[in-house]
Image (cartoon, rainbow, N blue to C red):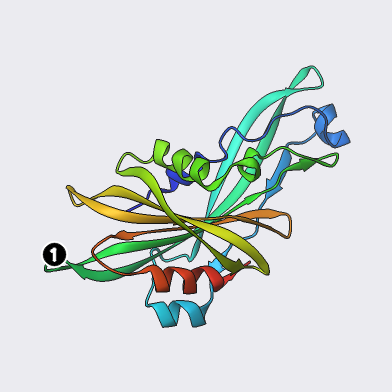
Amino acid sequence: MTLTRRAFGGLVSGAIVAGTGCLGFILGDEAQKFEASPATISAEASGETGYEQASESESEEMRIERTVEGGGQERDIVAVNYISQYEKTVEFLGQEKRAAVFIAFSTPEVEILGKTLNPVGEMDNKELIEQAQGKYEGLTVGDEVGTRETELLGSTVDITKFEGSADLDGTEVPVYIHVGQTDHDGDIVIPIAVYPQMVDEEPETYTNITGIEH
């Protein structure tokens, strides 16, 4: 199962709007740039849970560029997000497949003159995963089946669990999806886990969440 990065880029692709900003931005001298810091799983947590990074680079940059109206003129906006994706081989239906996925996604809060303009921070967990679902054809999110509090980067957050289905090598597989979010050091950090319902990866999911570094 591969959750494409465009799914998470869709969370913030329309996030930044221009009203007022820094002087250089208003005058059109420069693009307004907002960049997150990568969020990753600690080596201790990934060693315990057995998740491995899905690509050569642990965190991949997702750059979103938009041209918007500002000061009566067009201006360029750049948002730099990061996605760290991990996978684990699990056994189900008599097969071993890299079918458990954990993602740590970070996006800048995008603050101009004290006003936060990234709507991701205003979304609840259902809205977050529905945004991702809308950009990923192989993922279908169903009903909420539970909520659990856990520690994430020094804050107590609600992690919501959903039923769903995902395409795995052409086969529709029932999955569980966990999602939550927190604000940390000027970014919004979002953990997302997806794994087949036939395996119990919930303990590993929460170890990964509490092991996120940013």
Q: Nearer the viewer, residue 178 or 148?
A: 148
Q: Residues within 10 Å of mark 1 (few under 14, many from 20)?
A: few
Quadrant where the C terminus is found in the figure: bottom right
Quadrant where the N terminus is found in the figure: bottom left
Q: Hey, which quadrant is residue 50 in on the image?
A: bottom left
- Residue 77 visible to an observer of this rendering: yes
Q: Residue at x 51, y 44 (%)?
A: 128
Q: Nearer the viewer, residue 149 or 201?
A: 149
From the viewer's perspective, tell me whether residue 82 is left or right of residue 155.
left
From the viewer's perspective, tell me whether residue 39 is left or right of residue 24.
left
Q: Which residue is mark 1?
A: 93
> Dot 1 lies on which element?
loop
Q: Residue at x 57, y 40 (%)?
A: 12
From the viewer's perspective, tell me whether residue 133 is left or right of residue 40.
left
Task: Find the residue positioned furthest to the left.
Answer: 94
Percent position (x, y) of residue 18? 74, 29
Q: Residue at x 73, y 55 (%)?
A: 186
Q: How many marks?
A: 1
Percent position (x, y) of residue 26? 83, 29
Percent position (x, y) of residue 171? 17, 49
Using the image, determine if residue 32 lies above or below residue 163. Answer: above
Percent position (x, y) of residue 5? 44, 48
